[in-house]
Amino acid sequence: MKTRKRLIGIAIVLVAVIGFAFAPVQKITVKGSDTMVIVAQKWAEVYMKKNPNISIQVTGGGSGVGISALINGSTDICNASRQMKRSEIDKLKGRYNTLGVEIPCAKDGITIYLNSNNKVSELTLKQLSDIYTGKITNWKQVGGADADIKLYGRENSSGTYVFFKENVVKADYAPSCQTLPGTGAVVNAVKKDKNGIGYGGAAYAEGIKICKVKKDAKSPAYEANAQTIAKNQYPISRYLYMYVRNKPTGAMKAYIDWILGPEGQKLVVETGYFPVK
Amino acid sequence: MKNFISKIVKATMLSGVLLIGAPSFSQSVTDTIKEKVDELKDRLNGIDERVLTNESDLSKLNKIKISGYIQAQYDYFENRLSYPSNSFQVRRTRVKFQYEPVDGVKFVVQPELGPGGFELKDAYAVANAPWLKNIELWMGKFNRPNYEVEYSSSSREVPERSRIIKALYPGERAIGAKLEYSPKLIPLKVQVALLNGNDGLTIKDASGNNVNTAQNVTNKDYDNFKDLMGRITYSLNLGTGVGLDFGVNGYLGQLKATSTTTIKGDYTLDKSDVKVGDALKRNWLGAEFQLYADVLGGMSIKGEYMFGQNALPGYITSSSTTTSTTSLNATADTLTISNITTKDNSQKPNQINKFSGGYVYLVKNIGKKNQFALRYDFYDPNTQISKNDIGVKKYDAAVADVKNTQTFYSTSGAQTTKTVIATITKANIKAASGVSDIAYNTLTLAWNYYLNDNIRFTLAYEMPMNEKTNAVDSKGNYLVYDKGTVNGITKYNYYNDVFSQNTFTLRVQAKF
C-alpha cells in the first residue's frame, strides 16, 4: 500500500516536471505591409533562432489588410507603411476601447524605379505628380525619349499606395496606372518595360535604375540613402510602423524591444531600409 | 575482312544518308518547335486578354461592398403584467450596399429586412469636393450627427440606445443634406446638416392618427421649416494610451403649429393668438465626451448631456350642427331663430416644454473576447413640471380654455338694429399633463462575448426606473403604466408605485 502510494506520488512528480520542462510555445502573428514583409521575416527568423519557445508567423497582404486584421483580432502585430487613418482608429476604439499603440520601427525612402535604359535620372515632386495623374504622358516632356510613359503602382490596400498618393500624387491616380500586388511585382514590371515607372520601398530596388527626386526645379536632387533620409533631404521619406492593440506585455514586448534594439535595427539596414533613430 | 569492309561501307552509307537528311530533319524539328511556340504564344496572348478583361471586371466588383448584420434575441420581461412575459425576436436585419466608383464618391443603401417588414434605413450619396479635399457632401437619408445615433447598433455594447436619444431622434435617420469637414492635420470633425426635421416624429390628430405618417410625409417634409443640426468634435491624444474625444452639438428646429393656442411645459398659457402654420421652436444643446484608456486592456468612459426645448403640435377639429327653433316676428314680439349653424371647435393646444437628459457608459474589455458594459441614462421630458404637478389638478382651465362664442342678431322693420339674442359659449380645450411628462432613469448592464469577428453574444439586463408620482387623472385614478390580467383579474401598474419594468436579453449577433 505504502509502495503503491509512493509510486503514484513519484509518477505525479515526474509528469509535472516533464510538463513544466516543456515550456509552452508562444505564438505571435504578424500581418500587413508588403514593403516590410522581407525585414519582418528576417526579424522573425533571427528572433526565433534565439528564442525557440516563440513562434512568429509573418504574412504580407498590404498595410490595409494588416490594419483590418488588427481590428478584427486576427493578428497580434500589424506592420504598416503608413499611419492608421482616423476611421481605422475609430473602429479600434469601437471594438477594443483602445487607441492602439503606434511603434515606428524603421525608416524608408519611397524609391522611384525606372528601367535601366531610361535616359531620365531625376524628377521633381510636381513632375511625379503630373506623371501619375496622367498630365504628363510622354517621357520627352521630362527630358527622356519620345515614348509613352507606362505607369505601375500598387493596389489601394497598400500603405505605399496611400502614402505616395497623399504625399506625392495628391490627386487620383491616372486610370492607366497598372495595379500590381506587391513591390516586387512593380520592380519586375519596370525591369521589363523600358518606358515603365514605378514606386516602392528602397529595399526592393534591384535590377532597375533609381531615379533621384527633388522638391522642386531649383532644389538639388537626392537619392534615398541613410544620409539623405537621416537629414530629411530626400523628399519622400517615411516611417515604417508596427501597430498593436494594447501596450505590449510579455513575449510580444520582448520581441518588439528586440526589433527596436541594435540587433533588430541591424537587420533593417541589411534589408535596405534605414534605422528608426 | 570482307565482313569488316561491309560494315565500314554500311556505316559510311548510313552516315551519308544521315548527313544528307540531317539538315532537313533539324529544319522540320525547328519548324515543329516554332509552330508549338507560336501556338503557345497565341494561347498566352489569349489568356492575357481574358485576364485583363477579368481584372477590369474584378476591379469594378471590388468597388461594391456588401456588409450587414442580424440580431436575434430572447427577452424576458419582469413586469408581472407583461403578456407575453418572454419572447424571441429578430431585432435587426440590415444589409448595407456601398458603391465607391472613384475615391471620395460613395453611394449607400441600407434596408432593414426584418420580419416586421421592409424599411429603408439609409439611402444617401457622398461626394468629396476635389478642390477642397477634406469636405464631404452627403445627401439623402442618413444618421443625424450625434454620437450615440451614429454609433452602429452592431458595435454598441448594450442592446438599445438611451431613452433621450430615442425620444429626440426617433428612427435615428433624417432626410436632408450634410457637410462634413475633417482636416488632415487637425483631429477635428465638423458636421452641419439641414434636415426636413419631421423624421420619425409622432404628431397625432384628434382621432389619434399619426399625421406624419398618415399623409405619407415621412419621405417629405411635414411643413415649410427646415431644421439645422451641428456637431463639432475634437480628439486629444494624451499619451500612454489615453485619448479624449470631446465635442458639442446643437439642434435648431421648428414644427408648424396646427392649433391656435400654445401652452408651456407647466401647462400655462404661452400664446392664444397662434396662427396655424406658425413656428413652434425645437432647440437644444448638447456636450459629449469619450475617454479611452489602456488600463489592463481597453476601457472607455463615454457620456453626453443635452438640454433645451421640444415642441409638439396640437390639433383642431370642427364639427357643425344645425338647429331649427321658433321664428321671430318683431311686430308680434315673438322670436324665431331659424337654421342656426353652430360650430364646435375642439382643440388640443400646441405645447413647448423644456427638457434635459443624458447618459454615461463604462466599457471594459477583458482580454480579446470579453467585454463588460454599464450604462446609466436619464431623461426628464418636461423639466417645467415636477412629479407632484403631473396630472390635471394643477391645470387652470379658466386661463387656458378658449371660448368659442357664437352671437346671433335680429333685425327689426326698416331700421336694422343689432340686438344680441343668444350667445353660446363652449369651453373645450383638451390638454393635461400626464404620462408623457414622467422622468426616467435607466441602468443597463451587459456582458459581450466575441466568439470571433463575426459572432457576438450579449447578455444584458435593463432596469428602467420611472419618477414616482401620486398624480391622478381627471377621473381621480392614479396614472397607469399598463394593465394586464392575472388569474382572471385585471391588474394595473400605477406610476405611484414601484414595479419592475426590467428586461433580460440574450442576443446573438452575426455580422459580415
Image (tube, coloured by chain):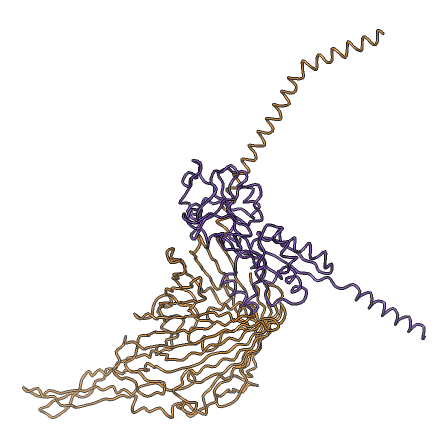
Chain colours: A purple, B orange
Task: Give residue B470's position: percent from left, percent from top.
Answer: 45, 92
Residue at (82, 68) in percent of width and height: A16
Q: How many marks?
A: 0
The picture quadrant where one finds residue B201 is bottom left
Task: Give residue B472's position: percent from left, percent from top.
Answer: 43, 91
The residue nearer to you, when weighing A4 against B82, is A4
Residue at (52, 74) in percent of width and height: B291
Residue at (54, 45) in percent of width and height: A186
Instruction: Give the left or right position of residue B346, taking residue A194 as reference.
Output: left
The picture quadrant where one finds residue A8 is bottom right
User: Dividing the image into 4 quarters, which one contains the N terminus of chain B?
Assistant: top right
Task: Give residue A75's position: percent from left, percent from top.
Answer: 62, 60
Task: Give residue B305's position: percent from left, percent from top.
Answer: 45, 78
The picture quadrant where one finds residue B388 is bottom left
Determine whether B212 is above or below B53 in the image.
below
Specify the farthest residue to the left: B414
Q: Is residue A77 visible?
A: yes
Instruction: Give the left or right position of residue A76, taking residue A6 as reference.
Output: left
Specify the farthest residue to the top: B2
The residue nearer to you, when weighing B100 against B295, is B295
Residue at (80, 8) in percent of width and height: B6
The residue nearer to you, when weighing B391 against A124, is A124
Determine whether A181 is above or below B443 in the image.
above
User: Dividing the image into 4 quarters, which one contains the C terminus of chain B?
Assistant: bottom right
Q: Is residue B120 visible?
A: no
